[in-house]
Amino acid sequence: MKNVALLGATGAMGQRFVQMLEGHPYFDLRLLVASSHRKGKKYGEDVHWLLGSNVPEYVRDMELHDFDPEILEREGIEVVFSALPSDVARDYEGKLRSRGFAVFSNASAYRMEKDVPIIIPEVNGEHIKLVEVQREKYGGFIVTNSNCSTAGLVMALHPLKKYGIEEVFVSTYQALSGAGYPGVPSLDIQGNVIPYIRSEEEKIRRESCKILGALDGGKIKDYHMRVIASCARVPVKDGHLESVVIKLREDVDLEEIKRSMQKMQGIPGLPSSPEKPLIVRDEVDRPQPALDAYCGGGRARGMGVVVGRFAKYGPYLRFFLLVHNTIRGGAGNAILNGEYALKMGYIG
Ligand SMILES: NC(=O)c1ccc[n+]([C@@H]2O[C@H](COP(=O)([O-])OP(=O)(O)OC[C@H]3O[C@@H](n4cnc5c(N)ncnc54)[C@H](OP(=O)(O)O)[C@@H]3O)[C@@H](O)[C@H]2O)c1
C-alpha cells in the first residue's frame, strides 16, 4: 500500500477522489489538504458533501491540513492526487515535484509542459516514459489527466487513428459538476443553456493533439489534425455529452468503425480500467447522461465512455459520446494513472 495525500479534498473533484479511494487496494488515503481557513477542522464536519447522503466513514474524522510539504514528508506520503484550481496547482504541484513526490493532477497548470504527459492509459500509456525525463530534472514527477471533455473525445478517436483523422468538429453539452462547487449560479442555468465555458475549446484542441501524438526521443510530437470545439454548459448534474463529426483520410464503413471501437481493450490487472473502455450502443436515443454516465463495473464504474448515433454523410462520420466528467474526465482517470505508474514501476 502507498500512502496518499489529496490536495483540494473539499471541492467537487476532491470529493470524487475521496469516494473512489475508499478501500482502494493500492492507495491508502492518509492526508487531506484544503484552504487554510479549514485547517484543523474535521473533514466530515466541514465539507459540503455533494455525493449522496453521507460523507464516507473512513474520512469523517480526518483532520484538514493546509498545504505544507513538510507534513507530507513527515506522514510518509509517496503519492499525491491533486484536485486544486489551476493557479494554486502551478505553485504547489511544482514544489512537491521538486521534493521527489509522484503527483497525479487534474489541474491544467502543467498539462502543456513538454516533459509532462497527459495520460489516459488505454490510449497513450507509453507517454508515461516522460516521467523519467522529469525525475532526472526535478527528483519527482507530475502526471496529468486531460480536461474532462477531452478525455471522452480522445478515447473515441483513438481506435480511428489507423484510418487517418483529418478534421474533428465537436460540440459539447457539459454537466454542472464540471464547473466545481458552488459553480454556476442556479438562476443562470435553470431552464437555460450557456454557450461558453472559459478556455475549454482551446484546451480540447491542444490536449487532443498532444494525447494522440507520438513519443519521439523524450518529446511528444503532436498528432496533426484540425480540431474545432464548441462548448456549452447544460443543466445536467454529471456526464458530458458530445456530438462529434470527423473526417477520415480513408473511406471506412460504419460497421467497421463500430467494430474498431468495440475492440478497444482495458488494461488487465488495473482495478480502475474497465474491460471495455468504449461501449457502442445502437439505440436511437443513446447515450444519455441519466442512463449512461456510470458505465463500467466495480472500481471502473463511470470509467467507460458510451458512443452511439453513428451516421455517415459523404466523407464525414458523426457520432455522440458520453463521458463522466468527474470520473473518467477527472478523479477516476487520475487514480487509474496512479495504478498504471505503479504497475510500470515508477512509484517507490
Ligand atoms: N469538475 C470537473 O469535472 C473537472 C474535470 C477535470 C478537471 N478539473 C480540474 O480539477 C480541479 C478542481 O476542480 P473542482 O471542480 O473540484 O474545483 P472546486 O470545487 O472549486 O474545488 C477546489 C478545491 O481546491 C481547494 N483549494 C483552493 N485554493 C486552495 C489553496 N490555496 N490551498 C489549498 N487548497 C485550496 C479548495 O479548498 P476549499 O474548499 O477549502 O476552498 C477545494 O478543495 C481544477 O483544476 C479543475 O479545472 C475539474
Image (cartoon, helix red, strand yellow):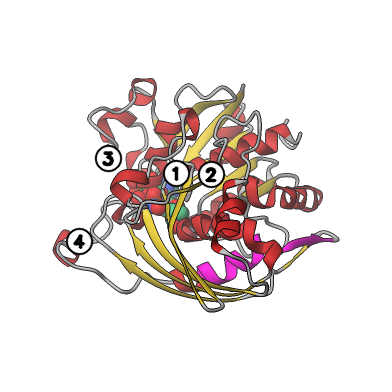
Quick one: label 3, few (<14), some, or many (20+) residues within 10 Å?
some
Task: Give the number of the mark in front: 1 or 4.
Answer: 1
The reply to whether the C-beta atoms of the residues labelled 3 and 4 are less than 8 Å apart is no
* Depicted 310 relative to depicted 92: above or below: below
Task: Give me the C-alpha separation between circle 3 and circle 4.
Answer: 16 Å
Q: Which mark is residue 333?
A: 2
Q: Position of residue 183 (x, y in %)?
A: 28, 57
Under mark 1, the amino acid is: Ile
Say whether residue 208 is magenta: yes
Give the numbered dot on residue 327.
1
| Residue 159 within the magenta-colored segment of the rendering | no
Lower position in the chain sequence, tag 3 or tag 1: 3
Q: CA distance from mark 1 to mark 2?
A: 6 Å
> Where is residue 88 shown, x and y percent of the image?
48, 56
Q: Secondary structure at mark 1?
A: loop
Contact (Cβ within 8 Å) of mark 1 with mark 2:
yes
Q: Range of the magenta residues?
A: 203-216
3D distance between C-alphas at marks 2 and 4: 28 Å
Q: Which of the two discs, 3 and 4, labels the residue nearer the N terminus?
A: 3
Q: Is mark 2 in CB contact (under 8 Å) with mark 3?
A: no
Q: Position of residue 85 (x, y in %)?
A: 44, 56
- Magenta residues, dominant SS class: helix
Q: Looking at the image, do the residues carrying marks 2 and 4 touch, with CB atoms under 8 Å apart?
A: no
Looking at the image, the residue that sits furthest to the right is: 217
Q: Amino acid at mark 2?
A: Asn
Q: Residue at x 34, y 58 (%)?
A: 179
Q: Which residue lies at the image location 66% right of the left edge and 37% below the top edge?
A: 340
Give me the disc on residue 50: 3
**N-terminal label among 2 and 4:** 4
- To which residue does mark 4 refer? 185
